[in-house]
Each structure stands twice: as structure tokens, then as C-alpha cells.
Amino acid sequence: MAGYAPRSRGLSRRELLKQIAGAGLYLPFVSGAAIGSPLFQNIEASTTSVQGLSPEDDRLLEEIEKAHFQYFWDQANPQTGLVRDRCNAHTNDNSIVASIAATGFGLTALCIGENRHYVSTDDARNRVLATLRFLWKKLPTHRGFLYHFANVNTGERVWDSEVSSVDTAILLCGILTCRAHFEAHSEISNLSYEIFNRVDWTWLSEDTTLLPHGWRPETGFLPYRWDYYSELMMMYLLGLGSSAYPLNVDVWNAWKRVKFEYDGLRYIGSFAPLFVHQYSQAWFDFRNKRDKYADYFENSTIATEVHRRFCIELAKQFPDYSDDLWGITSSDSQLGYVVWGGPPALGPIDGTVVPCATGGSLPFLPTATLRVLHNIRNRYPVAWSRYGYVDAFNPLKQWYGHDVIGIDLGITLLMAENLRTNFVWETFMKNAEATRGMERAGFQPYTPSKKPLF
């Protein structure tokens, strides 16, 4: 079926999106609101701290974080530190495929786990060291960039996967988080510095201001470019922040920021699932900052609210969707792995609910997303596993996925911690590469109530 592909074949979310685009499954964006209508002003305040959470909310978030952390502890090879791309949440899983993106989330999870005493300082630090040593000495690289999928035990390339620009960026975010959190440990600091600075961003941008998705030794650069607003921000900002191979500032202005409108709400977006509004913001702190184009934190808040309304509108077709149960982003489905979401409707939506859609947006709409996560935990016990929420489930079809996916657990874990304590944001932003990247991109502090979104 067009649009479906199991992740076991090694296709990335971006490759699936390109396939869908090529098949003509993107629909023109249509809205009943007139372009130029005022920006919606009453969206839920998005700066909730732990003091604003109820005891029930905090207990749920603690349960989620502890379960999701356990995935990254159990499903990493202790010798290599590489984290499995996914696993069956109900049985022992001996799959060998790791992803470097899951490993980046896993490194950040180790910092969260040590900070919350899910694991001892010595055990967390030793796991970080094992990971960094393997990344530096043994994992195959090209110009510092890493292959998307690797053997969890040996590090060998799997599935003829590409050297991935954005997945390398996710790994680097995890590495920098460890460097800042374990700053007193000289070997962690030194290895983090060396791994980050061998990444040759100038090779990636040699003849283009729009970075390619990746490179394969058999065919060269992939034909796709990071040209529209998406999770690309973290990658461009890391490249701008590099001291060894910095990107030119022109790259920040090269990608397109297309304005969408839905139900009177205007925001920058893409024809892509909700995760594109979440990933960069798991590490980079965009709150109360803007470049010359937008306030991206408030933009993600609006995009999440738009998605909530879109799902509720879909209740006419799929009556399981409601204010208490919504959220669609790239995930498993009854027919395999699929890229879906909206608006506009993307992929064969069938009533499936994806917990990381709301979990990854916790800091943007705390009350609305927590309502959903409480509802899933209380009313759908089969959707909970030893590692927390399963990747997806469909109440209409009585289907519950048996797998969890590392990056989906990761985005929920990191955003839950950011909502509670700002820990990941505050730790990651201690890195000079992060602050320098945002400064070179033109970010300035501002008071959101006094200026428009864009």
C-alpha cells in the first residue's frame, strides 16, 4: 500500500514523506479563514513549570519518564552504547538494529536518569563513556557524519542506510547534553569536543545553502534538500555553532518558512506530521527568543493547537477522537509504519492514536496534552507497557501496537522533563555551540506579548 513501510526496512521518516509527496498524496492547504486574520490570542499559556502541575500530573509524568528511561537503559548495548531503533515491549527482543537518533535521545536520557536517580551517577557516567569511546574510535563515519542505522553490537552499517545529516544532529544534541551535565569529567568533555568538531559541515554545504538529507557511498548525496521548515532547525543551528567547520550564516535564511492558516490560526509549517514542530525544541530553548522571521516556540504552540482542532474535527469520521483523545504523527499502524498527520490530512488516517504526538508537545500545551495522556493511561491499559506507552493504538479497531520506538519514547521523555524542570533546555544551552548557533542565526530575546509571532 502506498505510504506504508515497516521501519525494519530502514526507511527514514523523511524518505517516507518524499515517497508520499511523489505519489501525489499531499493535498493543497485549504482553510475557511481569510488570510491575514488576526493571530489567535487565547491559546493556553505555554510556560507552565512544575509548580503549575497538579500532584496527579506530576505523578503521571514521573511514571512516564521512569518507564521511557528504562527503554534507553535496557535497549542499549552496554559495550557500544548504541540504542535499538525499536523493540517489542512485551517480549525479549534480540533485534540488532540501532539508530543514531535513538542513541542521541538515549544519551540525553542518561542525563535525565542520573539527575532523577533512576540510575547511579557512576553507572550513568560509565554508560556515557562507553558510548562516546565507541563513537569516537569504532563507529564508521564519513566526514564526521554517521550512518542512520547500525548494528547495535558492532556498529556496522545496516540496510545500506545513508549517512544522515539530521540523525547525526540528534546524536550531537545528546552528546552536547552529556558534556554539559558531566562537565567535571574531563574524558567526557574531551570526547564530546572531538566528536562534535570532526563533523565537517562545510562538506555538506560545499555547493549549496540547503543541506542535503544525507549521502551514500554508492551514489553520493541524496537528491533531497532540507528546504522547508521542519526538524531541520537543530541541524542548521549546530552547523552555525561549530568552531571547526562552521556553516555560512546564509544557510539560516535559505530554507522556506511557509505560512499556513487553519480555523483562524496562522503559523509556519510544512506538509508533514507533528514531530517536525517538536524535535529541535527538545534541546534548543526557543522560549522568549525570535529571529527576524518568527517566535518558533509560540509557533509550535499554535501548530499543536491546530492539530488538536484538526483531530477533533476528524471525530465526524473517527469517533474515538475527542478533546480527551487526539494526536497523530509518524508511527506504527495496523498495516505497518506510516507517516500521517495534518492538517491538511496526510496519509491514510484511520482513528489511530499516537501517544508521542501529545507527549512531544507537553511544553507547548500542557493542560490539553496532559488530559490526553491521563486518559490513555486510565482508560486504555493495553496501551501501556514496561516501557510506557506503546507506539500507537486504535480503539476503533481494538488494535494495540506491540512495539515501542526509541525516538518516539525519547521525544516524550525529554519534553516531559522540560515541562517539569526545564532540565534539558538549561543543560544543553550551556554549550557554546548552541548559544553561538542561535546568535549567528540572529536570535534575540524579546517579550512575546509585545510582538507578533511573525
Image (tube, rainbow, N blue to C red):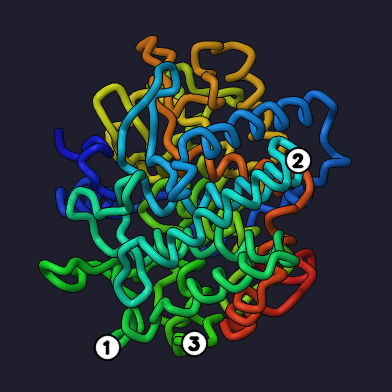
Circle 3 packing at 10 Å, graded few (<14), some (14-19), many (20+), is some
Question: Mark 3 or 1, which is nearer the eye?
Answer: 3
- Label 3, label 1: how far apart the Cα atoms are: 18 Å
Which quadrant is the N terminus positioned in?
top left
Tell me the tag on residue 116.
2
Q: Quadrant location of residue 163?
A: bottom left
**Circle 3 sits in a helix, a strand or a loop, which is it?**
loop
Residue at 41%, 63% in the rendered image: 168
Q: Is residue 43 visible?
A: no
Residue at 35%, 12% in the rendered image: 397
Q: Can residue 153 be seen?
A: yes
Say which residue appears at 70% left-offset and 60% top-offset. 182
Percent x, y of residue 292: 60, 80
> Do the numbered discs 1 and 2 sit on residues whose CB atoms are within 8 Å?
no
Residue in the foreground of this view, choosing between 109 and 151: 151
The location of residue 320, given as percent across then percent down, is 47, 17
Q: Position of residue 229 (x, y in %)?
A: 43, 65
- In the rendered view, tell whether residue 141 sits above or below residue 129: below
Residue 208, above or below 101: below
Q: Amino acid at mark 3?
A: Ala
The residue at which mark 1 appears reads as: 207
Left or right of residue 379, residue 160 in this image: left
Looking at the image, tell me whether mark 3 or mark 1 is earlier in sequence order. 1
Q: Please tell me whether residue 20 is drawn above or below residue 59 in the rendered image.
A: below
Give the mark, 2 or 3, whose residue is nearer the N terminus: 2
The secondary element bearing badge 1 is classed as loop
Measure the alpha-carbon separation of dots 1 and 2.
Answer: 45 Å
Instruction: Look at 43% across and 78% down and name the residue there.
Output: 198
Q: Look at label 2 and name its amino acid.
A: Arg
Spot occupied by residue 316 in the image (x, y as percentages of width and height): 42, 22
Q: Kindly state the secondary structure of the residue where label 2 is placed.
A: loop
Q: Which residue is mark 3?
A: 244
